[in-house]
């Protein structure tokens, strides 16, 4: 459980990075090596929180459950986690990266959270999309919050971002920055003239909850499945800080985040603060979870 939220002025400004890369299914060693090269580039540009795509080490479109098992690893003991742990320690940064996690006979679409001092924890995707139901168990660890010198980090993966309850519960726990590894695919009836639905949802959720959101998507076509790219970093006011990225090219987005400004931006005007204006007499502010209720 997260600790009380310190004052915003106690935190330094931080540069966050969303790494957009092409991940090839089954080519785990190459995926990890290229991810580390991108991480090193981001760190050299000053990034201290770096987010990689969903299932960044294994690729996404598995042919069978057996193939998924053959690529999965325990966390944090597996070689991918260990490689990212070493990179974070060497570079003095935080890494949030999608990984195929094996826990006994169960597989999870997960994200590992790593800091300069080592492994911090794992988020397991709560809401499975499409054929993920054939390979993964639904996440069983809720919405953990990770305390850092740059503020409180929350994590979601891809389709989790379609559920407003997820963002609200993170905001109620005092999260400042949401890290979203993702593999966005085209939505039904999507019109190329309009922004992707995922970006629209991220901007709306950031605005209505006062959250910074770092969306790291992948690009490419894998076994016939196209991915959208268009990674995005969104401010706590809901406006893009960086991106959307291209729809077909590996690239890194960077944005500075100032927590004092981010938290003050939750005050929309002299009268309205969304989180304060909630009608606790009408609906349960913690959506029935019973988690402690921080008041910022």
Image (cartoon, rainbow, N blue to C red):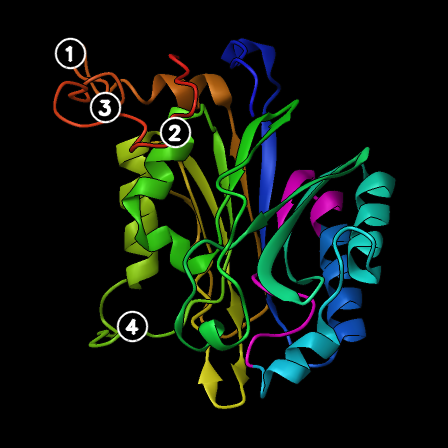
Query: Which callout, 3 or 2, points at the residue further toward the start of the chain?
Result: 2
The vertical placement of 173 against 246, above or below, is above
Identify the residue at image location x=27%, y=17%: 267
For disc 4, the marked residue is 187
Residue 20 visible: no
Q: Horizontal and vertical percent for residue 65?
A: 60, 81
**Magenta residue span:** 42-61
For disc 1, the marked residue is 271
Q: Horizontal and vertical percent for residue 82?
A: 84, 53
Query: Which callout, 1 or 4, points at the residue further toward the start of the chain?
Result: 4
- Closer to the camera: disc 1 or disc 4? 4
Query: Which callout, 4 or 3, points at the residue further toward the start of the chain?
Result: 4
- Toward the viewer: 251 or 216? 216
Identify the residue at image location x=48%, y=72%: 132
The vertical placement of 66 against 255, above or below, is below
> Marks 2 and 1, how far apart in space?
20 Å
For disc 3, the marked residue is 274
Q: Quadrant of the C terminus?
A: top left
- Closer to the camera: disc 2 or disc 1? 2
| Badge 3 element | loop
Q: Quadrant of the N terminus?
A: top right
> Marks 3 and 2, how far apart in space?
11 Å
**Displayed quadrant of residue 25:** bottom right
Query: Which callout, 2 or 1, points at the residue further toward the start of the chain?
Result: 2
For disc 2, the marked residue is 171
Identify the residue at image location x=52%, y=73%: 219
């Amino acid at each position: 459980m997260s600790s009380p939220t310190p004052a915003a002025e106690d935190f330094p400004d931080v540069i966050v990075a969303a790494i957009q890369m092409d991940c090839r299914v089954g080519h785990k060693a190459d995926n990890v090596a290229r991810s580390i090269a991108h991480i090193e580039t981001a760190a050299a540009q000053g990034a201290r929180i770096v987010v990689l795509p969903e299932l960044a080490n294994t690729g996404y479109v598995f042919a069978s459950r057996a193939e998924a098992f053959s690529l999965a690893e325990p966390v944090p003991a597996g070689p991918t986690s260990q490689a990212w742990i070493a990179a974070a320690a060497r570079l003095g940064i935080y890494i949030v990266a999608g990984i195929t996690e094996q826990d006994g006979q169960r597989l999870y679409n997960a994200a590992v959270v790593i800091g300069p001092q080592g492994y911090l924890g794992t988020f397991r995707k709560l809401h499975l999309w499409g054929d993920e139901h054939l390979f993964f168990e639904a996440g069983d660890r809720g919405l953990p919050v990770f305390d850092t010198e740059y503020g409180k980090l929350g994590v979601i993966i891809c389709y989790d971002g379609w559920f407003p309850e997820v963002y609200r519960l993170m905001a109620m726990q005092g999260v400042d920055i949401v890290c979203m590894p993702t593999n966005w695919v085209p939505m039904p009836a999507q019109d190329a003239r309009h922004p992707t639905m995922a970006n629209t949802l991220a901007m709306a959720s950031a605005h209505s909850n006062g959250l910074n959101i770092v969306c790291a998507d992948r690009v490419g076509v894998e076994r016939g499945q196209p991915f959208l790219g268009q990674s995005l970093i969104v401010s706590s006011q809901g406006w893009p800080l960086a991106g959307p990225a291209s729809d077909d090219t590996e690239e890194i987005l960077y944005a500075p985040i100032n927590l004092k400004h981010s938290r003050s931006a939750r005050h929309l005007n002299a009268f309205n603060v969304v989180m304060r204006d909630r009608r606790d007499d009408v609906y349960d502010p913690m959506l029935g979870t019973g988690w402690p209720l921080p008041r910022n």
